[in-house]
Image (cartoon, coloured by chain):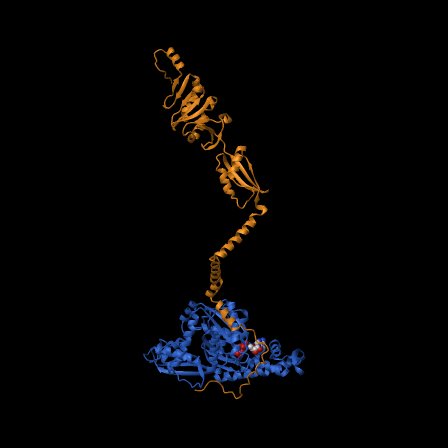
């Protein structure tokens, strides 16, 4: 079999003369660089170098350092010093406290409740906690705590409004509309505008007492106090020893009826010591002994008075 | 025909296929003046779809996408063969590292072109009687096995062996005779051998770069695959890749390469002629050639002067004027010589018997103005300048004529490899086969 290729009579020309002694080689990546470059193109190598190895190294050294107590102590002290340095800066120093919106005695109480010894760094002070502490005072309804410009802790207080006075044994206590105790007062006369409540469990029924008070407005001048009886129901004590005994249920409507009768027939000016409404249907009056005499005198046959 | 050929062909085919299956493959063209590399992303499903189309169907290129490209000057390659291993290795490292960076993707499998290695083309044929009246794969295998092996001589390896034509009784020009009825089946096969040393060197340099050699193709084959259009390949055409130190020729018919040859002359020789004629440094000669080189003298050229440095006494450079006519006078004879050799080669191959005889010039030297005219005059045929076909993502520089072989390697990868080699050799089976193939490969590469 003959090759298809022509036989050439001219011998192939001499190969190109070897290039002149190498002056400068063309730049080429060295073998190690080339291998590293190719290695780098493997996705897992990249992930390892970029994520895993740094994580391991950092984690490892961190763990090593922290596992030695001396280093930990050193770090702690450095940290504490740094924190102190910041804390002691003038910008954070609180030198005093200003309380607004509270009466003088309450101010003293609040100051005591806050219980901060000035000067103090505002970084050490948990304003939220201060607020809670102040609001925990019964006489304070709401408090706003802030640090204002001149290194002063400012407390803006809204006082709790007393709604009634409770006689608890020998003490007179102010109550708010829900029956929370606000403060003690020395004598009744200090807050003559407030109704006086007595009896066990009275403070638990303050809202009802206040509702009764609103209804009893026409006779407010004669009101002496509300007495909780048997922790169930109210008696309203008027001057001249009169007493309105209200039922357990429907006390409000019962009182309304009494007020209506008072306005129509001047019921309370009569000589009755008790107006008993405990029996829902009809009020029962207990007359003064003098009035009983009078009545028997006037209406001969009747032994004991009952009137509607 | 030895079973060894079956084994080696099958082995190369499997290697290439498994490389493609990995999704990324690199191609490296080791030229005498430049080493270039292209990294391809392979859409395996698409590729398989094309394969399923059948034997010999071209295409499959749209399953590839170029994702990295790079080219560098080549040192240490002469006449298309590796002359200085170290320099070549450095060159490959450079292009591969750059292309990988560009692609942001590592490649391990590469297909390499071999430009030198004194390719020799053989046309062989074998004939058998069809066993059962209907041609089966077995019959094709038998026909291939019946081909008489030419004596290649010492130290040569078969690099391509492709059945290009089947003849069944008196019908010829069959691409795939399976299932057809007939009595005698004959096959024409084109075989290409290159020197064993050239392939070995390539395998070695690839290994030194930590790469896996997935395939080798001779560069004329690759250039033809990318520079010829479908019709030319079908009807018959020659591709002439005019490189730096080699000018290679490949002839295609019916989409198969049927001949390849190499002329050991190229652009570098032109440069040397210029350097010698004007005593100029080689770099200057090269620059003058690429910037002002021409083949067709016009009346203007006498007056147009070019400046060229010249090596004077005491190695001092002095400036000197040459006219363009003088330059053409130096270039043209050399180009004529190259083209004469190409013609001799084509004549020996029987190019004139092809139904169509287009010639496509490609490669760096084909860019010289006037080359088309001169070539068509000397070769006596229709000539055009071919550029590599487009594949997706190909950067602009890679679409120039010098990169035909590089892009052609991509076409080679996408081309369905001959499945004929999968057909069993009659009466030769057994598990020994693969082991023997491996041994053959190890021994040789
Ligand atoms: N515009 C041009 N005009 C003339 N010659 C050119 C031009 N551009 C490049 N060349 C020449 O083309 C040659 C390079 O061609 P190419 O890149 O195809 O060669 P190669 O593939 O490296 O070598 P080979 O295929 O021979 O191994 C160089 O000699 C160069 O001088
Ligand atoms: Mg080339």
Q: Position of residue B260 (x, y in %)?
A: 48, 81
Q: Is residue A98 above or below residue B325?
A: above
Q: Quadrant location of residue B3?
A: bottom left
The residue that appears at 53% across and 53% down in the rendered structure is A78
Q: Quadrant location of residue B74?
A: bottom right
Q: Nearer the viewer, residue B347 or B433?
A: B433
Q: Nearer the viewer, residue B379 or A132?
A: A132
Q: Position of residue B32 (x, y in %)?
A: 54, 78
Q: Residue furthest front?
A: A70
In the displayed structure image, the side of residue B432 where residue B20 appears, left or right: right
Q: Position of residue B17 (x, y in %)?
A: 42, 72
Q: Residue furthest bottom?
A: A9
State the blue chain.
B
Residue B389 visible here: no
Residue A251 visible here: yes
Q: Is residue B163 above or below residue A232?
A: below
Q: Residue furthest left?
A: B132
State the orange chain.
A
Q: Position of residue A243 (x, y in %)?
A: 42, 21
Please identify the quadrant where the N terminus of chain A is shown.
bottom left
Q: Quadrant location of residue B159?
A: bottom left
Count how many numbered circles sit on residues in the image. 0
């Amino acid at each position: 079999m003959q090759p298809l290729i022509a036989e050439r009579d001219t011998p192939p020309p001499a190969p190109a003369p070897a290039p002149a002694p190498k002056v400068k080689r063309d730049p080429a990546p060295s073998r190690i660089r080339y291998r590293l470059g190719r290695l780098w193109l493997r996705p897992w190598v990249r992930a390892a170098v970029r994520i895993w190895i740094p994580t391991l190294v950092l984690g490892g050294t961190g763990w090593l350092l922290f596992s030695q107590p001396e280093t930990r102590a050193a770090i702690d002290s450095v940290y504490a010093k740094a924190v102190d340095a910041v804390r002691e800066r003038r910008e954070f120093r609180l030198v005093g406290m200003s309380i607004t919106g509270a009466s003088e005695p309450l101010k003293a109480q609040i100051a005591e409740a806050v219980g901060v010894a000035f000067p103090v760094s505002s970084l050490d002070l948990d304003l939220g906690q201060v607020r809670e502490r102040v609001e925990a005072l019964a006489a304070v309804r709401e408090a706003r705590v802030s640090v204002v410009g001149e290194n002063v802790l400012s407390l803006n207080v809204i006082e709790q409004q007393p709604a009634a006075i409770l006689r608890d044994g020998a003490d007179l206590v102010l109550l708010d509309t829900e029956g929370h105790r606000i403060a003690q007062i020395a004598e009744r006369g200090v807050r003559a505008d407030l109704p006086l409540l007595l009896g066990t469990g009275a403070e638990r029924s303050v809202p009802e007492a206040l509702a009764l008070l609103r209804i009893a407005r026409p006779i407010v001048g004669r009101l002496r106090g509300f007495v909780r009886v048997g922790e169930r129901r109210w008696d309203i004590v008027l001057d001249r020893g009169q007493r309105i005994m209200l039922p357990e249920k429907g006390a409000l409507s019962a009182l309304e009826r009494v007020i209506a009768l008072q306005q129509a027939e001047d019921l309370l000016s009569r000589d009755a010591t008790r107006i008993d409404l405990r029996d829902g249907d009809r009020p029962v009056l207990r007359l003064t002994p003098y009035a009983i005499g009078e009545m028997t005198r006037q209406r001969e046959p009747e032994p004991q008075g009952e009137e509607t | 025909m030895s079973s060894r050929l079956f084994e080696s062909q099958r082995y190369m085919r499997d290697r290439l296929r498994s490389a493609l299956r990995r999704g990324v493959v690199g191609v490296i063209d080791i030229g005498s003046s430049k080493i270039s590399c292209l990294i391809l992303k392979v859409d395996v499903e698409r590729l398989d779809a094309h394969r399923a189309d059948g034997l010999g169907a071209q295409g499959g290129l749209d399953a590839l996408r170029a994702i990295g490209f790079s080219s560098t000057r080549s040192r240490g390659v002469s006449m298309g063969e590796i002359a200085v291993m170290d320099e070549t290795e450095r060159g490959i490292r450079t292009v591969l590292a750059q292309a990988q960076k560009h692609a942001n993707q590592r490649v391990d499998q590469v297909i390499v072109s071999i430009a030198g290695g004194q390719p020799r083309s053989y046309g062989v044929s074998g004939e058998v009687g069809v066993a059962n009246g209907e041609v089966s794969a077995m019959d094709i295998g038998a026909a291939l096995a019946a081909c008489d092996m030419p004596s290649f001589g010492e130290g040569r390896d078969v690099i391509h062996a492709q059945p290009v034509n089947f003849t069944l009784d008196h019908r010829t020009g069959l691409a795939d005779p399976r299932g057809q009825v007939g009595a005698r089946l004959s096959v024409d096969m084109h075989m290409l051998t290159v020197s064993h040393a050239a392939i070995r060197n390539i395998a070695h340099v690839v290994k030194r770069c930590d790469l896996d050699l997935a395939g080798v193709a001779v560069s004329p084959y690759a250039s033809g695959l990318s520079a010829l259009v479908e019709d030319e390949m079908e009807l018959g055409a020659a591709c002439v890749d005019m490189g730096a130190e080699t000018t290679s020729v490949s002839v295609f018919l019916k989409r198969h390469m049927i001949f390849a040859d190499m002329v050991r002359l190229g652009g570098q020789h032109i440069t040397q002629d210029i350097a010698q004629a004007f005593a100029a440094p080689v770099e200057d000669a090269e620059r003058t050639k690429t910037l002002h080189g021409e083949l067709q003298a016009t009346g203007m050229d006498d007056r147009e002067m070019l400046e060229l440095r010249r090596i004077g006494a005491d190695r001092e450079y002095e400036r000197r004027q040459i006219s363009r006519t003088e330059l053409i006078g130096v270039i043209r004879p050399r180009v004529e010589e190259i083209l004469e050799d190409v013609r001799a080669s084509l004549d020996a191959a029987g190019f004139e018997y092809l139904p169509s005889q287009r010639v496509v010039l490609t490669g760096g030297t084909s860019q010289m103005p006037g080359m088309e005219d001169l070539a068509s005059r000397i070769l006596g045929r229709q000539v055009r300048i071919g550029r590599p076909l487009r594949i997706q993502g190909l950067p602009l520089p890679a679409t120039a004529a010098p990169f035909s072989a590089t892009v052609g390697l991509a076409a080679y990868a996408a081309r369905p490899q001959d499945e004929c080699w999968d057909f069993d050799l009659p009466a030769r089976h057994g598990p020994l086969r693969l082991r023997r193939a491996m041994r053959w490969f190890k021994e040789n590469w």
